[in-house]
Image: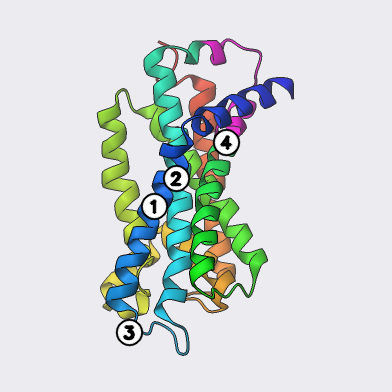
Amino acid sequence: MTGFFTLFYKELLRFWKVGFQTILAPMVSTLLYLLVFFHVLEAHVEVYPDIAYTHFLIPGLVMMAIIQNAFANSSSSMIQSKISGNIVFILLSPLSYHTIFLAYVLASVVRGILVGLGVYIVTWVFFDIPLQLPIWSIIFVLLGSGILAVLGLIAGIWADKFDQLAAFQNFIIMPLTFLSGVFYTIHSLPSGWQYLSHLNPFFYMIDGFRYGFLGVSDISPYISLLIVASCLMIISMLAIRMLRTGYKLRH
């Protein structure tokens, strides 16, 4: 456990030392989304009966901030270690691949939660945000941030340079995030787009997390929980296999 806590602490320090960039800046960006959509759509859109659009929007923005920063942390840490060459010291240490995996993933989950918590606290000051089922929200925060942290680890291992990592984020992570129902309910979409939304695992993260706030959702939270947990299990197995085989790590 000493090795695990050492690597975990190192990963925490990596983003904490530049907290202005890794924590405060994402909070400001997310709050700008809220400012724009609140002033433009608050008086014109009612997603659910008797629920203000702002109350619908804030949980989606909080979850979006959490998962994007969880991905950014693990992906940037891994590719920086590869490019600088210090990944060799981790691979040569007597740490199991499961330990390395957990240290990277849990540190990324912490960063995502810190950013999301900061966004929630700021919005809570100005808006009376309901939180009807907090246990559901906590479960989806942990699972959703875990999935993106693992995806970030996979992307960092796969990418050979920052351009490839940026392409992974811009053409996969960002579209899936913005098309997951952060700003709208999928019931407002045509039937074809609704079907495509159900193929997006990010939709289930957002919808399940929002259920904890509002008590209503586009799909059963139990279905969302099953799909999100299954996705986390599958991609975790893939990431651990990549670490065990040394894919693009042992050159």
Q: Mark 4 — residue?
A: 107
Q: Mark 2 — residue?
A: 24
As for residue 97 lying within the magenta part, the answer is yes
Which stretch is magenta?
89-105
Q: In the image, what residue type sits under mark 1? A: Val
**The label number, if any, that marks residue 106 in the structure image:** none
Q: In the image, what residue type sits under mark 2? A: Leu
Q: Is residue 12 visible?
A: yes
Sequence order check, earlier mark of 1 and 4: 1
Foreground residue among 8 and 246: 8
In the image: residue 65, left or right of residue 40: right
Query: Marks 2 and 4, Cα distance to the nearest angstrom?
Result: 17 Å
- In the rendered image, the quadrant that contains the C terminus is top left
Q: Mark 1 — residue?
A: 28
Residue at 56% over, 55% down: 141
Label 1 close to label 2 by CB (< 8 Å): yes
As for residue 235 lying within the magenta part, the answer is no
Looking at the image, is mark 4 or mark 3 nearer the viewer?
Answer: 3
Q: Mark 3 — residue?
A: 43
Q: Are there few (<14), some (14-19), or many (20+) residues within 10 Å of tag 1?
A: some
Sequence order check, earlier mark of 4 and 3: 3
Sequence order check, earlier mark of 2 and 4: 2
Label 2 close to label 3 by CB (< 8 Å): no
In which quadrant of the rendered view does residue 98 lie? top right
Q: Position of residue 152 (x, y in %)?
A: 43, 37
Query: Marks 1 and 4, Cα distance to the nearest angstrom?
Result: 21 Å
In the image: residue 184, left or right of residue 73: left
In the image: residue 166, left or right of residue 143: left
